[in-house]
């Protein structure tokens, strides 16, 4: 969203937003047939940026990173409902609680368990504001509201969808209670399978269906394997040279997980690479799948086979990467998923017939 010239790390802060580039970027994702794009909260306000990008597109959805507690929950619910109405249902709230505090915004530090507990109360109030027919009171540990209501309801029914990320027990608890989508970063297949199983176990405790699972991963594509890995190592070298981790109070749980896996090896499974993650000290979702389009498609499908339902794919050159993903990856993955689903449905019908015949 910032100017096209190459800005040094952190130099983009204070730069003028390039609205033409933001428009082109949104349209490129729409033309590439992305369902939705994530707008993070490291730069401009995600809500304002989404409103502008939505006005430049027709069907592209927006997943907006939102820090619970930095804005009053009823006000947040009203704002998101308004944006959902003006975009005709293209909005998702993505709750982010990964850091101990946001001192630059005046937030007081609390421990991780309390942070997720507070996020649960926050999302409870937000969701009730969206769905309650009558004003309500709320007397929680972290939030107290009186006569809460919003003059506008979301376009989507029953409310704006909510997604949640995190690897702690607290994250799993609020995900199964308040979210329809649980977000994780790319890790080895066995580790992702374990996390999905853990998510389902928390859903079973609550007696609810488990949320769908979204996995965020960088895709580094080359015409050949050699060219793909050459490109990947060039990106990592640039990151190591230029990236400076912003000072924070401790690392997020996700960052700790990435660095722990990276210590076991730089490359996992067939195409998962941690070179880009270690280059930025695990500070964000930075693991990569590296290879030709066929290699990356096969790797994504392996994650689908263990329960991942949505891929949040990004690269390091957003406009051109969006074009490449649309050209080489998105339609191919969707087609293979369709074939798998048809095969499973047919197999399920065979099993039903066998059971009926046995009876």
Image (cartoon, helix red, strand yellow):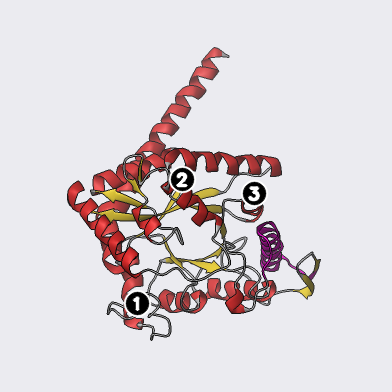
Q: Is residue 135 visible?
A: no
Q: Mark 2 and mark 3 in contact (Cβ < 8 Å)? A: no
Residue 270 locus on image (x, y percent) = 32, 40
| Residue at x 23% of width, y 48% of height | 292
Secondary structure type for disc 3: helix
Magenta stretch in the rendered image = 109-137
| Residue at x 68% of width, y 61% of height | 111
Name the residue nearer the viewer: 297 or 229: 229
Q: Is residue 101 magenta?
A: no
Secondary structure type for disc 2: loop
| Residue at x 51% of width, y 68% of height | 64
- To which residue does mark 1 refer? 23
Could you tell me what secondary structure mostly forms the magenta stretch? helix
Q: Is residue 129 magenta?
A: yes
| Residue at x 28% of width, y 61% of height | 237
- To which residue does mark 3 refer? 169
Mark before the other along the chain sequence, 2 or 1: 1
> Marks 3 and 2, Cα distance to the nearest angstrom?
19 Å
How would you rate the neighbour count of disc 2 (Cα within 10 Å): few for under 14, some for 14-19, many for 20 or more? many
- To which residue does mark 2 refer? 308
Is the N terminus in the top left, top right, bottom left or bottom right quadrant? Answer: bottom left
Name the residue nearer the viewer: 260 or 37: 260
């Amino acid at each position: 969203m910032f100017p096209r010239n190459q800005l040094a790390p952190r130099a983009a802060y204070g730069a003028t937003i390039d609205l033409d580039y933001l428009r082109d970027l949104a349209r490129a994702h729409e033309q590439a047939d992305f369902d939705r794009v994530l707008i993070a909260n490291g730069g401009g306000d995600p809500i304002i940026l989404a409103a502008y990008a939505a006005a430049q597109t027709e069907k592209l959805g927006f997943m907006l990173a939102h820090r619970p507690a930095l804005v009053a929950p009823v006000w947040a619910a009203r704002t998101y409902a308004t944006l959902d109405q003006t975009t005709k249902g293209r909005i998702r709230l993505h709750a982010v609680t990964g850091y101990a505090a946001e001192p630059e915004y005046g937030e007081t530090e609390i421990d991780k368990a309390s942070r997720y507990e507070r996020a649960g109360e926050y999302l409870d109030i937000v969701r009730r504001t969206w769905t309650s027919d009558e004003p309500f009171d709320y007397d929680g540990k972290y939030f107290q509201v009186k006569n809460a209501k919003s003059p506008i309801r979301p376009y989507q029914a029953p409310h704006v969808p909510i997604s949640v990320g995190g690897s702690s027990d607290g994250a799993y608890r609020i995900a199964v209670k308040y979210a329809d989508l649980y977000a994780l970063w790319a890790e080895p297949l066995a580790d992702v399978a374990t996390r999905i199983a853990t998510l389902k176990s928390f859903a079973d405790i609550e007696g609810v269906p488990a949320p769908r699972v979204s996995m965020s991963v960088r895709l580094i594509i080359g015409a050949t394997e050699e060219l793909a890995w050459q490109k990947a190592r060039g990106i990592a070298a640039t990151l190591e040279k230029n990236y400076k981790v912003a000072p924070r109070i401790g690392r997020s749980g996700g960052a700790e997980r990435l660095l722990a896996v990276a210590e076991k090896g730089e490359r996992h499974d067939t195409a998962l690479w941690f070179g880009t993650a270690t280059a930025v000290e695990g500070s964000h979702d930075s693991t990569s799948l590296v290879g030709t389009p066929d290699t990356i498609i096969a790797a994504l499908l392996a994650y689908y086979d263990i329960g991942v339902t949505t891929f949040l794919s990004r690269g390091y050159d957003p406009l051109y990467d969006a074009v490449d993903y649309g050209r080489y990856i998105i339609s191919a993955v969707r087609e293979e998923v369709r074939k798998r689903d048809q095969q499973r449905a047919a197999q399920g019908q065979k099993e039903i017939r066998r059971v009926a015949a046995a009876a």
